[in-house]
Image (cartoon, helix red, strand yellow):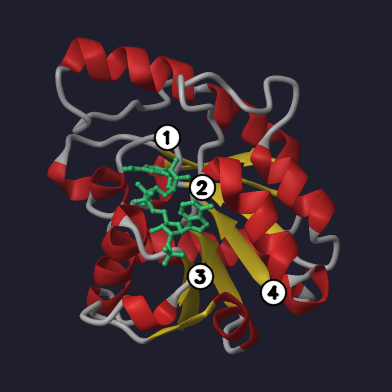
Amino acid sequence: MRLAILGTGNVAQTLARRLSETGHEVTFGSRDPASKAGLKAPVTSLADAVAGNGVVINATPGAASLEVVEGIGAAAFAGKVLVDVANANTPSFELLYPNSSLGEKLQAALPDAAVVKTMNTAAMAVMTEPAALPPSSVFVSGDDAAAKSTVKSLLAGFGWPDDSIVDLGRIASARGTEHYFLMFAALMQTAGSPKFNIRLVT
Ligand SMILES: NC(=O)c1ccc[n+]([C@@H]2O[C@H](COP(=O)([O-])OP(=O)(O)OC[C@H]3O[C@@H](n4cnc5c(N)ncnc54)[C@H](OP(=O)(O)O)[C@@H]3O)[C@@H](O)[C@H]2O)c1
């Protein structure tokens, strides 16, 4: 699959490395592509990255993500899958959207795209390499079943078994996984490391 990743930070590079290893072709979209020489995949403008790819991953800071996609323009996202892995918090680690979620805000801003929230509930090294921990869970939220299938196939490629991928339903359920950020921060203090995850048991 050909994918664009918005952002060139830690998460973008971790995702790009693992996507390449699992057979995908990645292009980074950056605010300043000329300054990003040396990355392991091509870097273009944000708009060109979206234009050239049907699946786009949002790996920008959650507080900036809406501005980033609105800057590119909703029309550019028509018919595309936007995989949103961002967490939207303030500099003091409070929720930016305590009565909503970034996933919902992105879907409202991009009505002709299919936004899928996933991979925001653990460190990206865990999300892209689940076999490094005992069996755990990854969550998927979105209104479009076909877009969620696309995302589930990417997760399967990273090594997530079928029964570890928990489909939470519509994009409004991203509230749950985004608000879990507070619990994640507390657990990280307790665990003394970001290398942990949770599992749904019934
Ligand atoms: N750290 C994790 O393990 C983890 C796990 C799950 C989810 N997340 C989420 O993943 C997202 C990315 O995290 P990260 O650690 O990769 O962040 P980061 O290192 O700060 O990188 C974010 C990238 O977004 C781009 N960007 C676009 N607009 C920006 C703006 N206004 N200010 C700053 N950067 C901007 C930048 O790339 P250009 O300079 O090339 O434009 C930047 O390198 C965040 O939303 C985070 O909550 C992180």
Residue 8 in the image: x percent, y percent?
37, 65
The disc label shown at residue 177, or none: none
For the residues labelled 4 and 2, say whether their Cβ atoms are less than 8 Å apart: no
In front: label 3 or label 2 = 3
Judging by the rendered image, the residue that carries numbered circle 4 is: 80
Judging by the rendered image, the residue that carries numbered circle 3 is: 31
Q: Amino acid at mark 4?
A: Lys
The answer to whether residue 42 is seen in the rendering is yes
Secondary structure, mark 4, is loop
The answer to whether residue 170 is seen in the rendering is no
Position of residue 86 relative to residue 96, above or below, is below
Q: Does any atom of ligand 1 lie closer than 8 Å to the CB of label 3?
A: yes
Q: Amino acid at mark 3?
A: Arg
Judging by the rendered image, the residue that carries numbered circle 2 is: 118
Which residue is at the front of the view, 185 or 159?
185
Secondary structure, mark 2, is strand
Gap between marks 3 and 2 measured at Cα? 24 Å
